[in-house]
Image: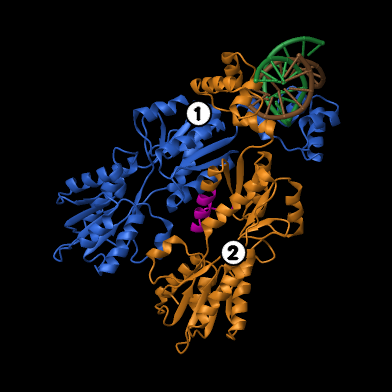
Chain colours: A orange, B blue, C brown, D green
DNA sequence: GTGAAAGCGCTAACAA
DNA sequence: TTGTTAGCGCTTTCAC
């Protein structure tokens, strides 16, 4: 059996309460007994039992993370940042993957609640009043990231809309006459929470309007590649293909290469995310970069502050930057 | 407050023990009371408290994962597979990242043990007799993946050596006369556990010998790119650059492109891992593929079987396949 | 078939 | 300063 505080108490000839006082730096104990207990604990290689502590304290020192999956590079980077910051602050991380399934996501959340996590970092696909109320039923701190839920929930993210608008400004300055917008997740509008994607799209449309660009072709379905396969590029005008994530941009790039459409001479491509793999791809993809690691770290810091001191650390929308590659 | 079994007991006019019998499908209870309790639990929206259950059962229904980081695509895929399989089997996953730091790894392991995880899936950088003994001190099931520790520990992986040897056979069949081997982790030989990398290297050397190839140039340091920058390729002979992971291969490819060394005409490249990003890279990298998802799933199944039924499910080394691209 | 009681390892309130 | 006691919510043993 593992050594418990009782064992230490017996060895030192004191009570369990006193051992607890020594071990956890509580007041009301003499230096002498504290040292004695501490030394005994050391010698006996005492390791505290977190499950017992959790039960009595109602705290587990763990954070639950609800994510789609780890397929997207950015998610992996995010998760990496979260784990590091969390453990630095003394917390462990439960990772749960929802596969973008709303019901599955609720199951994940409930499981986390039942396991008494101290807080949840939530990248949700759910939305709406009902979900908002659902979340409120749990009295557990929650920080939302990327997909906004409502004013009721702390949020860490970037100014998606502004970022995409600036991207359009940048493209417009390059004399593109035609615009195509690629964002298959938009097909889920109304059905699931695609806040970030919607914001990017709104930003795109704002940019189009502000730059007096012609009406763009918007591909908001999974068949965007087929559509692009059939698309006839006007040789007299340059077309800009704006993709809501780098992954779509790379797919588009592959297709254009296959079709022998010169990039960016005939068609330009821009992505969003700045995933690290871009460094191996040519032509270098132009994209929008945002501080993914910071998002993870800030989310953890905010929620831990809420847990330990009662208030979130509100994080203003973080910055972004257009990475100028050779693709547009 | 949350509803507990006591509350249900009070409502139903039975004892807590009886509620437990009903809730957990235990014997010694009439259908009638069972139904009554179950219904009450349903109505009261009872949610079991895992921390309490963990304390009394000594089990937490959680698996601890010890990984380097999530930077490498394969790790993310692995983690993804592990989470899915684990939750399918009713387990939650604590993720801990070691950043390849041996001491940090031990801290992770000990934290996991203190949190009473039921099992640990370990991708270690530690090694040796002392570490072996260290692990034995914990009476927690452990499955090692990728980096082998010793016969004492269950292991899930592939036949790294054989895979690399076959890769060399394949290359040799293509009339390459010069061989360069790239594997910076080899610099840590003796210092940390680089089992997979060592095995791949041994396989490479075996392949070289068997094919009567000339003595290869082995780059086993972080400065491999500088070395390759200065390397003079013999225009009369094709050089094969064998990389121990895709990431190194991509770096090498970038460098060769910069140097305008024609691939694979003058220099061929082969990687290892078959990361999914390869589909966006041209020329298509030739590489060795192995079932990363299966490794994760099998590791989970094996350890859960050990936890619940007392024995691991030994997994024979899994298969691999050479993915023939255009880079060699 | 059911209830009562003990206890998992720890914390915290109250006595002494 | 220290010990005692009563739980946290659940499981389990032993009476009845």
Q: Is mark 1 on a helix, strand or loop?
A: loop
Could you say which is closer to the camera, residue A59 or residue A24? Answer: A24
Horizontally, residue B86 falls left or right of residue B207, namely right
**B318 drawn magenta:** no
User: Any mark on residue B140, and which?
Assistant: 1
Quarter of the image holding residue A182?
bottom right
Instruction: Judge from the rendering whether residue A222 lies leftward or rightward of residue B263; answer left or right.
Output: right
Residue bearing the label numbered 2: A158
Q: Is residue A98 visible?
A: no
Closer to the observer: label 1 or label 2?
2
Q: In this view, does B279 lie to the left or right of B17?
A: left
Q: How far apart are marks 1 and 2 (CA)?
A: 43 Å
- Marks 1 and 2 close (CB-CB < 8 Å): no
Up the image or down, A57 lies above or below B234; here it is above
The residue sitting at 56% across, 67% down in the picture is A222
Instruction: Give the letter of the chain under mark 2.
Output: A
Prevailing secondary structure class for the magenta stretch in the rendered image: helix
Q: Quadrant of the C terminus of chain A?
A: bottom left
Residue A101: x percent and y percent?
63, 54
Percent x, y of residue B203: 26, 44
The quadrant holding residue A179 is: bottom right
Instruction: Please name whichever residue, B80 or A203, is drawn nearer the observer in this view of the structure.
Output: A203
What is the number of the mark on residue B62? none
- Measuring from the top left, give residue B135's x and y in whole percent: 43, 29
Q: Give the range drawn in magenta.
A: A67-82
- Between B119 and C11, the residue placed more toward the observer is C11
Left/right placement of residue A129 relative to residue B153 reads right
């Amino acid at each position: 059996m593992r050594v418990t505080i009782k064992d230490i108490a017996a060895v030192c000839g004191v009570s369990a309460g006193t051992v607890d006082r020594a071990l956890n730096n509580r007041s009301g104990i003499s230096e002498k007994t504290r040292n004695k207990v501490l030394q005994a604990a050391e010698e006996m290689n005492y390791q505290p039992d977190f499950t017992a502590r959790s039960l009595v304290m109602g705290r587990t020192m763990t954070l639950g993370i609800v994510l789609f999956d780890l397929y997207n590079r950015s998610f992996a980077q995010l998760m990496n940042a979260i784990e590091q910051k969390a453990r630095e602050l003394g917390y462990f991380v439960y990772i749960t993957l929802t596969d973008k399934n709303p019901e599955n996501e609720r199951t994940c959340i409930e499981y986390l609640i039942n396991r008494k996590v101290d807080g949840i970092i939530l990248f949700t696909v759910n939305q709406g009043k009902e979900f908002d109320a659902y979340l409120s039923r749990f009295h557990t701190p929650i920080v939302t990231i990327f997909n906004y839920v409502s004013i009721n929930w702390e949020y860490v993210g970037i100014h998606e809309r502004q970022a995409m608008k600036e991207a359009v400004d940048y493209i417009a300055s390059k004399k593109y006459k035609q615009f195509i917008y690629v964002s298959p997740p938009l097909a889920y509008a109304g059905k699931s929470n695609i806040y970030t994607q919607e914001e990017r799209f709104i930003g795109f449309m704002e940019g189009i309007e502000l730059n007096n660009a012609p009406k763009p072709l918007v591909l908001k379905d999974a068949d965007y590649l087929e559509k692009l396969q059939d698309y006839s590029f006007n040789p007299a005008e340059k077309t800009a293909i704006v993709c809501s994530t780098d992954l779509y941009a790379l797919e588009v790039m592959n297709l254009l290469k296959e079709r022998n459409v010169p990039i960016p001479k005939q068609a330009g491509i821009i992505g969003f995310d700045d995933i690290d793999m871009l460094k191996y791809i040519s032509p270098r993809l132009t994209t929008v970069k945002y501080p993914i690691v910071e998002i993870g770290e800030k989310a953890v810091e905010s929620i831990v502050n809420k847990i330990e001191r009662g208030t979130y650390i509100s994080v203003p929308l973080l910055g972004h930057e257009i990475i100028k590659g050779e693709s547009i």
